[in-house]
Amino acid sequence: MSDAADFESKPVPPKPGRGAVAARLAEILRVDHAGEMAAVAIYRGQRQVLGSAAGHERIAGQLAHMEAQEAEHLARFETLLTERQVRPTAMAPVWRLAAFALGAGTALMGDKAAHACTEAVETVIEEHYAGQIAELAERDPELAAELAKFRDEELAHRDLAVEEGAKDAPAYPLLSAVIGAGCRAAIKISEKL
């Protein structure tokens, strides 16, 4: 595992001071909401390209299934934001557009590139959720359990993408590295903005 992956999976302790725990929880909910919103947009972009293309019925079905699961996660985070009075990221419109473009762009490169996108995104998200689960295990075990369920579904998406040939995509190492770096940057930005 790389140093970056090690860093991502370690719990982030709240900063000391009054309201620090609530502020950290707001960061977690804000970034997770943004991530699920982006995931829905990625799959929509991929389905826009591949959904009606002849010979792509199987992947279109896979994408629809994964999008539906991401939409369930998104709905849950929307509820949590409302219940806990946390504002969504100010970057939401940018992330939604960028994610749709990423989905459509990788789909235009072909099925394997679309799967490479899923594999790269879900790898980062799994690491991210793992760190949050460890951080929240004692402080908010109910939320940690929900995140564990979501993480397991993200892992299933990643595993399916790998089985479907994600690593055989054109320029896979570069594609995966760029998408992963973009996801990590979006996570850090969404926590704060």
Image: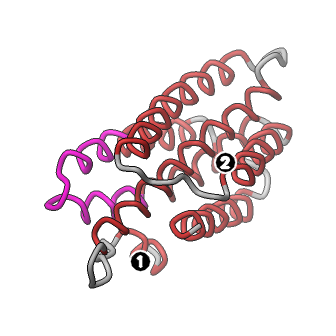
Residue 50 within the segment the image draws in magenta: no
Residue 45 rendering spot, x and y as whole percentages:
76, 35
- Say how the picture is coloured: secondary structure
Residue under the point 69% across and 52% down? 95
Where the N terminus falls, by quadrant?
bottom left
Q: In this figure, which residue is indicated by the disc labeled 1?
A: 7
Residue 149 within the segment the image draws in magenta: yes
Between residue 191 and residue 107, name the one nearer to us: 191
Q: Is residue 167 left or right of residue 51?
A: left
Residue under the point 29% across and 41% down? 146
Q: Which residues are magenta?
A: 127-150
User: Is the residue marked by circle 1 packed among few (<14), some (14-19), or many (20+) residues within 10 Å?
Assistant: few
Q: Is residue 135 left or right of residue 190?
A: left
Task: Find numbered disc 1 in the image and state the secondary structure of the residue it sits on.
Answer: helix
Residue 4 rendering spot, x and y as whole percentages:
49, 77
Q: Is residue 86 left or right of residue 58?
A: left
Q: Which mark is residue 131?
A: none
Which residue reaches farthest bottom?
Answer: 16
User: Is the residue marked by circle 2 packed among few (<14), some (14-19), or many (20+) residues within 10 Å?
Assistant: many
* Residue type highlighted by circle 1: Phe
Q: Is residue 173 above or below residue 14?
A: above
**Label 2 or label 1, whichever comes before in sequence order:** 1
Prevalent SS, magenta region: helix
Residue under the point 68% across and 38% down? 41
Q: Residue 77, located in which quarter of the rendered image?
A: top left
Q: In this figure, which residue is indicated by the disc labeled 2?
A: 117
